[in-house]
């Protein structure tokens, strides 16, 4: 068996895109979703990891940029493998628990990022049609994970057994 020289091997490794988001919810299990200015579907606070940026730093940076929230993250509750599609390569999405947020907290958010039009607390049933289907599944899994305080691994937004 012929082995590649190490540098050639490293260049051949697959690169995956990564994103990180934060699940905020209220006492009634409504979730905070944001309306972006640059795409049709809504999202949770968060975004794409930049080069050499770990997901936990992405989540903190994005939430501060988008909503003006500057607080420590809760635990990691979701790791989701996202298969490639026609437009995007495969990737990994991470969701951290942001804890509880109230209507009053949402009303006081400092939304200065031009990428965000609005933010709302919504039931999962009301939010799901506004989200991409994979994100709706991921958010449902994240809500369950936050309730149980356990990390859930997913594939295409669906929890993976084992």
Image (cartoon, rainbow, N blue to C red):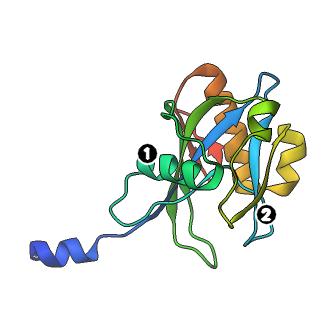
Q: Which residue is mark 1?
A: 56
Q: Picture quarter containing residue 145?
A: top right
Q: Name the side, left or right, on which 121 lies relative to 46.
A: right
The vertical placement of 40 against 75, above or below, is below
Residue at horizontal 59 percent and vertical 42 percent from the top: 69
Residue 117 in picture, x, y percent from top left: 78, 61
Residue at horizontal 38 percent and vertical 69 percent from the top: 15
Query: 101 or 148: which is nearer to us?
Result: 101
Q: CA distance from mark 1 to mark 2?
A: 24 Å
Residue 6 in picture, x, y percent from top left: 11, 72
Residue 41's mark?
Answer: 2
Residue at horizontal 80 percent and vertical 31 percent from the top: 104
Q: Is residue 1 in view from this perspective?
A: no
Q: Secondary structure at mark 2?
A: loop
Residue 125 in picture, x, y percent from top left: 88, 41
Q: Secondary structure at mark 1?
A: helix
The vertical placement of 145 against 108, above or below, is above
Q: Name the side, left or right, on which 155 lies relative to 5.
A: right
Q: Picture quarter containing residue 1?
A: bottom left
């Amino acid at each position: 068996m012929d082995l590649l020289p190490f540098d050639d091997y490293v260049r051949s490794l697959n690169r995956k895109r990564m994103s990180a988001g934060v699940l905020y919810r209220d006492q009634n299990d409504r979730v905070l979703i944001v309306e972006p200015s640059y795409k049709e579907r809504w999202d949770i606070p968060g975004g794409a990891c930049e080069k050499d940026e770990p997901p936990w730093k992405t989540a903190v940076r994005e939430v501060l940029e988008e909503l003006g929230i500057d607080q420590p993250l809760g635990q990691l509750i979701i790791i989701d493998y996202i298969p490639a599609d026609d437009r995007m390569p495969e990737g990994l999405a991470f969701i951290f628990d942001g804890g509880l947020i109230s209507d009053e907290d949402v009303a006081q958010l400092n939304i200065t990022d031009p990428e965000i039009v609005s933010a709302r607390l919504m039931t999962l049933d009301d939010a799901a049609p506004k989200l991409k289907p994979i994100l709706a599944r991921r958010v449902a899994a994240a809500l369950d994970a936050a309730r149980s305080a356990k990390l859930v691994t997913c594939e295409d937004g669906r929890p993976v057994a084992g």
